[in-house]
Amino acid sequence: MSKKEFSRRDFLKIGSSTLAALGVGTIVGGWFDLGDGVIALAASEGYLVVDTKKCAGCMTCMMACSLAHEGRSNPSLSRIQITQNNFANYPEDISINQCRQCPTAPCVEVCPTKANHYDPDNANVRLIDPKKCIGCQQCIQACPYTPSRVIWNFEDQHAQKCDLCVNTPHWKEEGGPNGKQACISVCPMQAIKFTNEIPIQTGNKGYDVNLRTKEWARLGIISE
């Protein structure tokens, strides 16, 4: 496969080890230079998708996230954020804002200390090393989504984001793409799901999905 035949979509379908075997591109600081101005990270092997129509807005996921990572219950420190518009009608009133583990991650690209990086030892998950963070908040500004998926920890003074529970010192369960995620474990509505498949990157369609079962149709609420 030549560089000209190799597209962004092709890159997302295979891992970095396969790329190396094919001899495609050059590794530069963890990035793949595919030529013709195409630069990409090795794709993460894990993503969170949500169903905002199932979400009850209880914020249990936020509490669990804060407890697992920080050891204290503070929704402002949660790496997943639930926002509610009191002037909107159901089911458009609630949004779930989680890190997308972007295939091309602006937050990783702008970090001057490489605190925000992708971790090949943990299935290429994009995460932040708080010890290397200098508090410049460039990653927060670089995130293309509103609200930013990178959170500022105002208590410990560093940036942080969803790491799929790779680093949860206050939770005994094994996390990461091959383990559990605290938010999924506690959600009473089962409105959050882990997937290895790369979601559609356009708009919210790929990350806001239908997780409803036939029981929802019986209730006359919402179903596909």
Image (cartoon, helix red, strand yellow):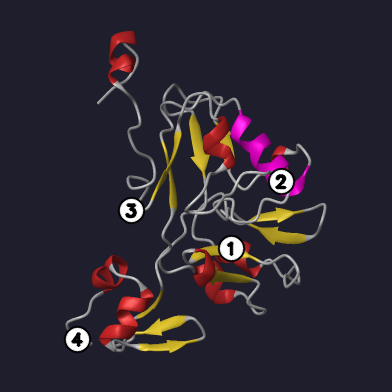
Quick check: 178 left or right of 183?
left
Tag 3 or tag 4, which sits nearer the N-term? Answer: 4
Q: Residue furthest right?
A: 155
Q: Position of residue 54 (x, y in %)?
A: 43, 26
Q: For mark 2, what is the residue?
A: 77
Q: Which residue is mark 1?
A: 127
Q: Tag 3: residue type? A: Glu
Q: What residue span does the magenta drawing correspond to?
A: 59-71
Q: Which residue is mark 3?
A: 197
Badge 4 element = loop
Q: Nearer the viewer, mark 4 or mark 3?
A: 3
Q: Residues within 10 Å of mark 3 (few under 14, many from 20)?
A: few
Q: Are marks 2 and 1 in contact (CB under 8 Å)?
A: no
Which amino acid does the dot numbered 2 rest on? Leu
Q: Tell me the CA gap for discs 3 and 2.
A: 27 Å
In the rendered structure, which disc, 3 or 2, sits on the residue that comes first in sequence?
Answer: 2
- CA gap between label 2 and label 1 equals 15 Å
Disc on res. 169: none
Label 1: few (<14), some (14–19) or many (≥20) C-alpha neighbours in 10 Å: many
- Could you say where residue 106 lies in the image, as x and y percent from the top left? 50, 69
Disc 3 and disc 1: Cα gap in Å?
19 Å
The rendered magenta stretch, by its main secondary structure, is classed as helix
Where, by quadrant of the figure, is residue 191 drawn?
A: top left
Cα distance between the residues tagged 2 and 4: 44 Å
Depth-wise, is mark 3 or mark 2 nearer the camera? Answer: 3
Q: Which amino acid, mark 1?
A: Leu
* For marks 1 and 4 on the same chain, the one whose residue lies earlier in the sequence: 4
Question: Disc 4 marks which residue?
Answer: 4
Q: Are marks 2 and 4 in contact (CB under 8 Å)?
A: no
Residues marked 4 and 3 touching at CB (< 8 Å)? no
| Residues at marks 3 and 1 touching, judged by CB atoms closer than 8 Å | no
